[in-house]
Image (cartoon, grey):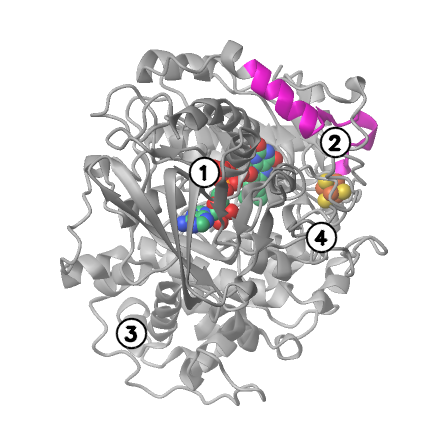
């Protein structure tokens, strides 16, 4: 039985649909959950607030991609702008725009989850069969070193020169042409995103997808969700068209991702005494820019193929971080760069020679961390009130990582290195890295970004300290599950997609049994 | 600190609402919005095809701002050519209503004589100032000790940069060759199921990958 993908333009009349399971969100978590459930013979309806954008539109230009494929056009941010939040919003969710890096969940994180949060359901042994299946389907394999672009080579060579631990990244690609536009939607479907793999596989087996359909509220009564109330969004204007979709499922899976899943629960008055939306983790990213004599052309070539976990554990009380590089395309680069007027244009004119390095900080593991707090915002439709609590440990780690990145860039031959402070620190040699000590290390003095949002519906054994149980069921309801990055009680220390894939595929087994 | 959601239907306090948004914070920090837009602004010709969400006055502020943030430079198109302020207006049609309101308030704040007067002892509006004074105001915002001013600067800067660098006319100046030619297929098939055969492509599972091609795991 073939299913179908409906888009907003086809949804012109109010609609009520009955099904076994309604999955809200079509990203990493939602896609795998829906796929496994249709395989079990369940009737599954998936709602996705973003549009169904495919390679027919993936022309590798930034304005089109940010408008169609990102939450708030790529402008999502903490209230005080201290963190720029890049998050996906289209069929495929974050996987349509992510940079393909694929890692299994580190053992030490599963241990923290087990020991501190009572999550006895997840171990490497339980997840391994799911990871293997995911890796097969998504063709996850090490990106060959000879295909590495010059931007990654800077990191690779810097790490080699300083004797730091380094590794090659596994990517979920098939016949990848090494173009470099993964973040704007892969124009040849080489990226094995949910958009081109698991979702169409599931549609072939009966999944019905409503794209441009935003779940606004869950109706619930006693211990059961009775309906999902959604509205159709005009793909071009991003405004509701007035058409309503009501889904009446036996069981509901919320997979809107961090920030959005808590948002839906809060709109539905499912608050878990205020815990919903709390402890949102961002893997806060600090960046350093290296200027090279040779061309780096960081806009082309597979965006991420090298990583280092050299600084992932830095001792008690310290926040760890890992290192990667991003693709550097003009529009995003110009918004992330700091400075005004001639300074910006001077830098942008050197785009071909710029390397950018990322330090991705592992938040949520230290005792005093509150992380991000997401709340509803009056009058908003797709925007939330978001605060993030930086601690002294954050600033210590940020300073350390920026220094290490500068050293790596110089070790790889950079002529100059620049921080992304509002008053940037410019370094002319590795001997000058201590100049970074004098920079202002506070919110909104240095650019911080995130592409990995986690938490906000944290899982745990104790209903008094968590939102979902170790089987991802909402504690006080019998037919509501949350399956996406929002259930993580801490961040991961690796790029999150494969952890979400694995957990979703694992969870689908017992979710199916609960229908 | 615990933050609980107010019960449904309860009206949040005005101060509560103000504190929530970026601009709420800015207005509080700057002493309220009573004097906003009471002074004269420069008039700027609106785009030929009109403005969608900005007022003529807000458009004028963005125009002045884009001149300062993107001064003339050889090899780069001018802000007039790219129509940066018009581009901002078009971007703002797509943002959340609260973000639009806040951006408008931010433009008012930038233009408003009072805060500039308080903080930098200037009595003129942003659009009527000399370019040196405009640069000084922007520098004050950028380097301010008050977080909301730095936040406001960053938000407006990002908007202007996005509007400018979204134009491919900037690519030659950047030395950016753009996407590789001959790859993107505007006629690629779009498959929506409903019994139609799924076209074979990189996403379909055929042929299956050779075992050697798959080597998952986190070292
Ligand atoms: C630019 C970028 C690069 C990245 N690179 C990598 C990488 O290389 N490797 C990696 O592992 N990870 C990467 N990530 C992160 C990764 O993509 C995400 O962690 C992952 O996709 C999150 O999965 P999820 O299921 O939690 O949510 P998502 O994949 O974000 O999916 C949630 C979906 O639900 C939809 N939705 C939300 N609310 C509603 C609602 N109320 N109604 C209907 N639909 C709703 C959203 O529009 C979205 O499409 C990257 C992310 C970005 C943005
Ligand atoms: S690098 Fe590969 S996966 Fe990424 S956009 Fe290019 S072809 Fe697609």
Mark 2 surroundings: few (<14), some (14-19) or many (≥20) residues within 10 A: some
Q: Tell me the mark number nearer the camera, choosing from 1 and 3.
A: 1
Q: Which residues are magenta?
A: A128-150
Which label's residue is closer to the chain start, 2 or 1? 2
Q: Position of residue A13 (x, y in %)?
A: 45, 67
What kind of element bears circle 1? loop
Of residues B157 and A498, the one nearer the viewer is A498
The label nearer to you, 4 versus 2, is: 4
The answer to whether marks 4 and 2 mark residues whose Cβ atoms lie closer than 8 Å is no
In which quarter of the view is residue A348 placed? Answer: bottom right
Q: Is mark 1 within 8 Å of ligand 1?
A: yes
Q: Main secondary structure of the magenta part?
A: helix
Q: Earlier in the sequence, mark 4 or mark 1?
A: 4
Instruction: Return the residue found at the far front.
Output: A1
The numbered mark 3 sits on a residue in which chain?
B
Name the quadrant containing residue B166. bottom right
Which residue matches tag 2?
Answer: A153
Label 1 CA crowd tier, 10 Å (few <14, some 14–19, many 20+):
many
Q: The residue marked by circle 1 belongs to what chain? A: A
């Amino acid at each position: 039985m073939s299913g179908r993908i409906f888009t907003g333009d086809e949804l012109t009349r109010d609609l009520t649909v009955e099904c076994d399971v309604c999955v809200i969100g079509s990203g990493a978590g939602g896609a795998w959950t829906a796929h496994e459930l249709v395989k079990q013979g369940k009737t599954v309806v998936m709602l996705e607030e973003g549009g169904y954008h495919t390679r027919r539109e993936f022309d590798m230009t930034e304005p089109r991609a940010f408008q169609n494929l990102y939450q708030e056009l790529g402008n999502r941010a903490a209230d005080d702008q201290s963190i720029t939040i890049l998050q996906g919003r289209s069929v495929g969710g974050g996987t349509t725009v992510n940079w393909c890096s694929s890692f299994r969940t580190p053992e030490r994180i599963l241990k923290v989850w087990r020991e501190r949060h009572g999550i006895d359901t997840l171990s490497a042994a339980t997840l391994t069969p799911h990871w293997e299946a995911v890796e097969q389907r998504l063709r996850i394999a090490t990106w060959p070193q000879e295909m590495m672009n010059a931007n990654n080579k800077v990191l690779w060579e810097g790490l080699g020169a300083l004797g730091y631990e380094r590794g090659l990244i596994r990517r979920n690609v098939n016949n990848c042409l090494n173009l470099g536009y993964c973040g704007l939607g892969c124009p040849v479907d080489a990226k094995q995103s949910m958009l081109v793999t698991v979702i169409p596989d599931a549609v072939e087996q009966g999944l019905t997808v409503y794209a441009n359909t935003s779940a606004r509220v869950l109706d619930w009564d006693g211990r059961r969700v009775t309906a999902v109330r959604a509205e159709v969004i005009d793909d071009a204007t991003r405004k509701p068209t007035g058409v309503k979709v009501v889904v009446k499922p036996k069981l509901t899976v919320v997979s809107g991702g961090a920030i959005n899943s808590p948002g839906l629960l809060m709109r539905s008055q499912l608050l878990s005494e205020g815990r919903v939306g709390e402890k949102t983790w961002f893997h806060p990213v600090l960046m350093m820019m290296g200027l090279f004599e040779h061309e780096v052309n960081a806009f082309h070539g597979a965006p991420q193929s090298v990583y280092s976990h050299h600084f992932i554990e830095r001792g008690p009380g310290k926040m760890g971080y890992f290192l990667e590089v991003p693709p550097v395309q003009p529009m995003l680069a110009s918004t992330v760069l700091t400075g005004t007027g001639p300074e910006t244009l001077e830098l942008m004119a050197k785009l071909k020679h710029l390397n950018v390095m990322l330090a991705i900080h592992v938040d949520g593991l230290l005792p005093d961390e509150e992380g991000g707090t997401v709340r509803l915002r009056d009058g908003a439709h797709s925007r939330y009130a978001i605060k993030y609590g930086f601690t002294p440990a954050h600033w210590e780690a940020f300073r350390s990582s920026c220094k290490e990145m500068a050293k790596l860039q110089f070790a790889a031959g950079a002529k100059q290195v620049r921080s992304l402070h509002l008053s940037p620190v410019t370094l002319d040699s590795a001997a000058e890295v201590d100049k970074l000590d004098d920079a202002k290390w506070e919110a909104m003095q240095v650019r911080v970004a995130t592409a990995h949002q986690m938490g906000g519906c944290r899982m745990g054994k104790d209903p008094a300290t968590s939102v979902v149980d170790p089987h991802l069921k909402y504690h006080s309801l019998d037919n509501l599950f949350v399956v996406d990055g929002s259930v993580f009680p801490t961040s991961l220390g690796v790029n999150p997609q494969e952890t979400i894939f694995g957990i979703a595929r694992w969870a689908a087994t017992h979710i199916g049994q609960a229908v | 600190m615990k933050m609980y959601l107010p019960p449904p239907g309860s009206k949040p306090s005005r101060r509560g609402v103000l504190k929530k948004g970026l601009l709420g914070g800015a207005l509080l920090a700057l002493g309220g919005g009573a004097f906003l837009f009471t002074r004269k602004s420069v008039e700027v010709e609106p785009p030929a095809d009109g403005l969608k969400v900005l007022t003529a006055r807000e458009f004028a502020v963005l125009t002045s701002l884009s001149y300062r943030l993107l001064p003339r430079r050889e090899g780069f198109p001018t802000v007039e050519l790219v129509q940066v302020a018009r581009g901002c207006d078009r971007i703002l049609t797509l943002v959340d209503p609260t973000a639009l309101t806040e951006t408008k308030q931010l433009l008012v704040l930038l233009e408003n004589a009072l805060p500039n007067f308080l903080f930098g002892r200037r009595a003129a509006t942003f659009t009527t100032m000399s370019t040196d004074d405009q640069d000084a105001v922007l520098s004050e915002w950028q380097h301010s000790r008050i977080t909301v001013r730095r936040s406001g600067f960053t938000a407006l800067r990002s908007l202007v940069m996005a509007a400018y660098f979204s134009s491919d006319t900037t690519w030659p100046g950047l030395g950016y060759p753009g996407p590789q030619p001959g790859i993107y297929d505007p006629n690629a098939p779009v498959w929506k199921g409903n019994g139609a055969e799924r076209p074979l492509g990189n996403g379909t599972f055929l042929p299956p990958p050779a075992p050697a091609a798959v080597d998952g795991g986190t070292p």
